[in-house]
Amino acid sequence: MLKTPLTSVAALMGFASVSVADVPKVATDIAPVHSLVARVMQGVGEPGMVVPNGASPHHHSMRPSEALTLSQADVVFWIGEALTPWLEGPVDELATEAHVVELLNLEGGVALPFREGVGFEAHDHGDEEQHDDDHHDAHEDHDDHGDDHDAHAEHEDHDHEAHAEAGHDHEEDHEEGHDDEHEGHDHAGHEGHDHEGLDPHVWLSPENAMLWLDVIAAELSEHDVENAATYAANAAAGKQELKEVKAEIKASLESVRDGGFVVFHDAYQYFEHSFGLYAAGAISLGDASDPSPARIAEIQQVVKQAQVSCVFSEPQFNPDMVATVLEGSGAKTVVIDPLGAALEPGAGFYPALLKELGAAMASCQ
């Protein structure tokens, strides 16, 4: 048997340890973000996740292992405090050596304000479609310049002043008189999601996800030049996969594009925006507040007037309340989940989430 000299073994072990040590330690907030980072890091390393799948992103209590993930991170990718207000403090206090990338505020991304009211204001479909076309063209331009990190460089600082200018100053949000106008809305149970500023459910836009793949690859490459080509190739493959998934979903939704539906809470407008769908309204103001009797009466009128065929509920919501809203309408309930709690986390999670939402909405006929 050929024996390898101990010095060679030691050298190989040393090389392996250096290679592993050079891979950035990455922390992410929610499963969709974790999935996109895992896709870029495929074959190189695995990111950590601070908000376990199935937990509420609005008020999760961090475990010691999740705090350790943050404290050891070289890079943190998260949506931002608009989605996880409780996480802003730990990011600042624990991830002191990390470069923090807040995805909600990235230049070139799709960012939509919250929709208000029980029945959303009438959409100008022509304007929406034109916006989709314009954004698609802009995104294609971004794809053509995947190696140009100028836009990414503008986001290299964890800039809370810019964050506040975008309408997400957490303290101001809680001081500007939301006590009476939102039907008993409980701030303590619905932190950081007070329906001012931008809707934080930005991960449900595949256009955003494709942009993020490039940003993630660029960021990781700055920390790990040796694996930069792998990160770039993985991001490119991930974007192509999402383009194919989007085309597949779009084709499946052609028959329901004009069908009326309402949602339990308004979490899906980015998905609607991407696929040309338009919700007629929402039962609840948010996912941590119960609708008042007056709001239920209003949404019942919306269901009737818009000839709604489906209500999209979520696993944690009371089915009896949905049944009350649909009473006498003939509409059906379809359970969907914007966070994909039943899906397996990992690189394949994000495409699977989009497909799951698309299939659910396609069933609304």
Image (tube, rainbow, N blue to C red):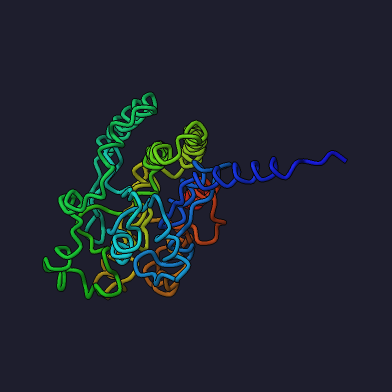
- Image quarter of residue 170: bottom left
Residue at 37% in and 45% down: 277
Residue at 16% in and 51% down: 161
Left or right placement of residue 361 versus residue 110 in this view? right
Q: Is residue 247 visible?
A: no
Q: How many marks?
A: 0
Frontmost residue, 70 versus 53: 70
Left or right placement of residue 180 versus residue 230 in this view? left
Residue at the farthest right position: 1
Residue at the farthest left position: 176
Which quadrant, please, contains the N terminus?
Answer: top right
Q: Is residue 148 visible?
A: yes
Up/down of 238 relative to 356, above or below: above
Q: Residue 108, image x and y in percent?
A: 28, 36
Q: Residue 324, image x and y in percent?
A: 38, 72
Q: Residue 107, image x and y in percent?
A: 26, 39
Left or right placement of residue 179 versus residue 66 in this view? left
Frontmost residue, 315 versus 163: 163
Up/down of 19 relative to 175, above or below: above
Up/down of 231 relative to 45, above or below: above
Frontmost residue, 316 versus 35: 35
Residue at 35% in and 56% down: 267
Q: Residue 127, image x and y in percent?
A: 24, 36
